[in-house]
Amino acid sequence: MTPEFSVSRILCENYSPLSGKGLILSGFRMLMTPLPSGKTMGDWNRRCRTKALTREISPRFTHALANYYGSGPTNLDASRTTHEEYITALKNHGLEVRTLPGLSEYPDCCFVEDAAVVVDGAVVMCNLGHPSRRGEVEGIRNALNGALEVIHMPEDAHLDGGDVLFYDDLFMIGRSTRTNDAGIEFIRGVMDERGFASVVMDVPSTTLHLSTVCSSPAPGVLVAAEGFFTPEQLAPLGGDIIWVPHEESYGANTIGFEGDRVIVSSDYPQTSAALIEHGFSLTEVDMEHIRAADGSLTCLRLFYA
């Protein structure tokens, strides 16, 4: 039987001195300590979320940034319909959903995931990587203030929440065109103080965020699109990796719930088949008009307990 591994107990060659916490997953060899017999990779206890914060589609959504999956949304009404169906799917999975008004001055404002990162009762307000989006954060802070401890990043630190992914008992953090080393170092410090390990991955410039091509629908399970990361990069994380074809890379972004339930984007048949084969039951949402603005399922929500 292949042993499971604890990422919190790793010795790594070519270790990056970025902050001294966690690891850099790029060009490395790892020696990993097996977990004690019978211990599982993770459970849902640290993924506790009962609420979701969302924000309406901006009246100027057709001006949203787009560089990877399309040239920008063209149908505002259809985008709003998609967003409403998405919120219905969240509610059907037992979440209490709060929706903030859309902002005409910020076309990308519906992508609330990027504005903040929730870490165990605290929320880190992000300095978004693209200057046009930084004004989106204030409304998110006001909405979460009182429910969570609010932490602000230093001015030189840039980070998009889409570059942060929770996997088992650790966070995966992407270094991308939107997230810099100062942002990574700061968020890792917050995670370390709260008892979470972290790993850092270099996100290829051919995609926007880490979560654009990678997600974790359940503890011990990672969905990844081919062509962005290699098996050698992800294997040290342990657990099961479900690879989806490069041409269906958008489908790698999923939202998982207890009971092996997963929300997926429709029209990615090979991805859906792989998840079903793995034992998941699926709820599909047509994300065509959100995809046109480089947005995915996870981009549209912030989960918190």
Image: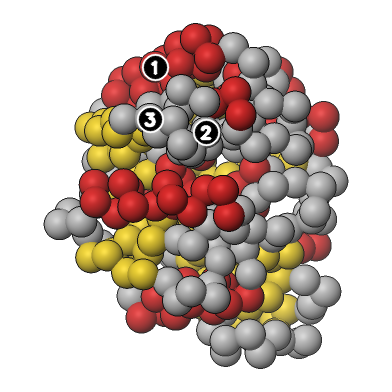
Cα distance in 3D space between marks 1 and 2: 17 Å
Q: Residue at x 39, y 75 (%)?
A: 190
Of label 1 and label 3, which has the lower sequence position?
1
Residue 40, x across and y down, in percent: 46, 59
Three-letter code for the amino acid on which mark 2 is drawn: Pro
- Which quarter of the rendering shows the N terminus? bottom right
Cα distance in 3D space between marks 1 and 3: 13 Å
The numbered dot on residue 47 is none
Residue 209, x across and y down, in percent: 65, 50
Question: Quick check: can you spot residue 241?
Answer: no
The numbered dot on residue 102 is 3
Q: Nearer the viewer, residue 135 or 270?
A: 135
Of label 1 and label 2, which has the lower sequence position?
1
Three-letter code for the amino acid on which mark 1 is drawn: Glu
Residue 242, x across and y down, in percent: 68, 41
The mark tally for this picture is 3
| In the rendered image, the vertical position of residue 32 relative to residue 227, given as above or below | below
Q: Nearer the viewer, residue 193 or 9?
A: 193
The numbered dot on residue 107 is 2
Q: Residue at x 45, y 76 (%)?
A: 154
Of label 2 and label 3, which has the lower sequence position?
3
Q: Residue at x 42, y 71 (%)?
A: 153
| In the rendered image, the vertical position of residue 72 relative to residue 244, given as above or below | above
Is disc 2 placed on a helix, strand or loop? loop
| In the rendered image, the vertical position of residue 29 relative to residue 172, given as above or below | below
The numbered dot on residue 84 is 1
Three-letter code for the amino acid on which mark 3 is drawn: Gly
Is disc 1 placed on a helix, strand or loop? helix
Q: Residue at x 39, y 52 (%)?
A: 137
